């Protein structure tokens, strides 16, 4: 049996005691990077979907190009382009900013499509009723269409939000000091993978509540007509 | 769709529009608040020509209430929320004032006690009355009804017609597209028969129902009446 070697490699108390504080620091960075990505990505996605609903052709075309491109590109590629290529055109940004911007744009692309599908799912009669009372297009969107569309978009949106916040791990490639960065640099420094185990635990601690919350919110918003 | 419609509705009048499906009744009605834009001609409501580009449609639409076949209540708001939304967002009333006016409007359709109920908790007839209250709350100069009872179970039609009759008695100007011939006979000032995008005949109910000039009108009336 190699059990003692497994414990020594992955559950090494001595190594864990040296690196757990780094991992906790990484959890903090992952958390606020994730929150910043969700806030910016959802806001941008919603704004784009609303803009698209005005059916102004050139704008709709650009939105569709953006959404398709950023849904197709791997987020890692976007991060690398922003961080390593943009300085050459005078747009240098920190690793944190590049990661935040890249993930926000990817989330915005997905969120735009999800919100758009939600907007389309609201019957046309709702718009007609609202407009017939003198509400403007924007008021109709804000007070009649979006509140109905949002309920429908909650399950796909929560899944996408969880996926994208885990994508913050990609920031480790450009040395954002999040969980995976600390875990992998700790592991190579110690010559022992126990910090990676701590990293995995950190993700469970952070994301299990989010996953459970999304389950709860999905049942809570289950649509009744 | 519509080919040269010439129709004037005077204040306090109830004009009933009948005709086969596809004859342009709903299109005509929807031109009256510019949900549909006519390619030519003008639509004048209360002295304002809705087809002029400089007209503020959101402003004039407040004074043109519309009631739809499928009610189109907002499912995420309760009855009072449905009735007060435009009062608050368009007219700019505060919450308290809007709710007081909303309760008044719901009282007129006999549903004040359902103010907190959501549309999915109301019967079809109640939903349609809330929709009427939603239009009434804005104190419209005219109310447009687009087949208001067509989506209702027969036993619920009466409650909606009762509200419409009361509105008529209060002097509300109304244009109604409907197949409720009994109601037309009893309450309409004038019945307009449309076919193929034109007004084929119009006159007092007595004339349209009993002595129509066109055989086409007589056939239509007979067919619809025999269904009821």
Image: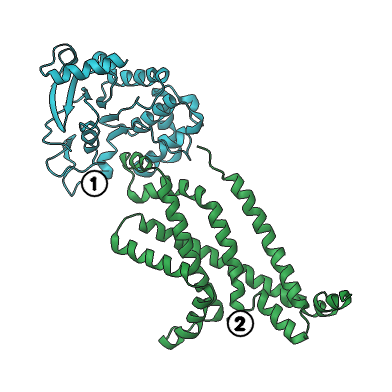
What residue sits 65% from the left and 58% below the top? A210
Residue B24, visible in the rendered structure: yes
Q: CA distance from mark 1 to mark 2?
A: 56 Å
Report the chain holding disc 2: A
Q: Nearer the viewer, mark 1 or mark 2?
A: 2
Identify the residue at horizontal 42%, vertical 45% (top origin).
A122
Q: Is A215 displayed left or right of B92 in the figure?
A: right
* Residue under label 1: B56
A135 relative to B199 in the view: left or right? right
Relative height, residue A50 to residue A26 (above, below): above
| Residue at 51%, 81% in the rendered image | A80
Q: Is residue B184 visible?
A: no
Element class at badge 1? loop
Q: Which residue occupies the extreme bottom position in the image? A: A88
Q: Position of residue A1 (x, y in %)?
A: 89, 75
Q: Position of residue B99 (x, y in %)?
A: 44, 34
Tell me the crowding category of disc 1: few under 14, some 14 to 19, or many 20 or more residues within 10 angstroms, Cα based.
few
The colour applied to the residues of chain A in this rendering is green
The C terminus of chain B, quarter of image: top left
Palette colour of chain B: cyan
Given the current orientation, which residue lies at the most extreme front position? A1
Q: As rendered, which of B107 and A196 lies closer to the eye?
A: A196
Q: Looking at the rendering, in which quadrant would you find the N terminus of chain B?
A: top left
Q: Position of residue A53 (x, y in %)?
A: 36, 54
> Image check: A82 left or right of A166?
left
User: In the rendering, at what x and y percent does residue B126 appear?
Assistant: 44, 25
Query: From what the image shows, is residue B154 above or below residue A81?
Result: above
Per the image, the residue denoted by label 2 is A175
Tags 1 and 2 touching, CB below 8 Å: no
């Amino acid at each position: 049996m190699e059990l003692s070697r497994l414990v020594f490699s992955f559950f090494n108390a001595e190594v864990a005691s040296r690196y757990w504080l780094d991992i906790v620091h990484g959890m903090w960075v992952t958390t606020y990077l994730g929150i910043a990505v969700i806030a910016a990505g959802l806001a941008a996605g919603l704004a784009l979907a609303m803009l698209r609903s005005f059916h102004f052709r050139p704008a709709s075309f650009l939105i569709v190009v953006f959404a398709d491109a950023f849904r197709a590109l791997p987020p890692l590629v976007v991060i690398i382009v922003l961080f390593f290529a943009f300085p050459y055109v005078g747009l240098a940004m920190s690793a944190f900013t590049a990661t935040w911007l890249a993930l926000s744009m990817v989330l915005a692309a997905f969120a735009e499509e999800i919100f758009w599908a939600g907007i389309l799912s609201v019957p046309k009669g709702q718009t007609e009723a609202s407009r017939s009372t003198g509400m403007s297009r924007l008021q109709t969107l804000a007070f009649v269409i979006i509140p109905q569309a949002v309920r429908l978009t909650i399950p796909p949106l929560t899944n996408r939000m969880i996926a994208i916040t885990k994508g913050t791990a990609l920031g480790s490639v450009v040395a954002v000091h999040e969980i995976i960065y600390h875990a992998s640099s700790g592991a190579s420094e110690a010559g022992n993978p126990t910090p990676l185990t701590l990293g995995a635990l950190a993700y469970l601690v952070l994301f299990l509540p989010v996953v459970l919350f999304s389950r709860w919110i999905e049942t809570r918003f289950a649509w009744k007509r | 769709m519509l080919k040269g419609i010439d129709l004037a509705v005077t204040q306090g009048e109830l004009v009933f529009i009948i005709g086969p499906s596809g004859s342009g009744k709903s299109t005509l009605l929807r031109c009256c608040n510019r949900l549909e834009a006519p390619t030519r001609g003008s639509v004048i409501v209360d002295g304002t020509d809705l087809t002029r580009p400089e007209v503020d449609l959101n402003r004039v639409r407040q004074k043109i209430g519309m009631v739809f076949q499928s009610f189109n209540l907002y499912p995420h708001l309760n009855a009072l929320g449905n009735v007060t939304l435009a009062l608050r967002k368009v007219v700019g009333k505060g919450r308290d004032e809007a709710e007081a006016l909303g309760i008044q409007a719901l009282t007129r359709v006999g549903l004040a006690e359902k103010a907190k109920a959501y549309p999915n908790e109301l019967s079809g007839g109640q939903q349609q009355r809330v929709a009427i209250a939603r239009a009434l709350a804005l104190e419209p100069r005219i109310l447009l009804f687009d087949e208001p009872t067509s989506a209702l179970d027969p036993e619920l039609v009466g409650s909606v017609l009762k509200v419409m009759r009361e509105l008529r008695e209060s002097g509300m100007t109304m244009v109604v597209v409907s197949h409720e011939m009994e109601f037309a006979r009893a309450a309409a000032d004038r019945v307009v028969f449309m076919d193929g995008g034109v007004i084929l005949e119009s006159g007092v109910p007595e004339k349209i129902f009993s002595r129509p000039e066109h055989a086409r009108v007589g056939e239509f009336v007979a067919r619809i009446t025999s269904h009821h």
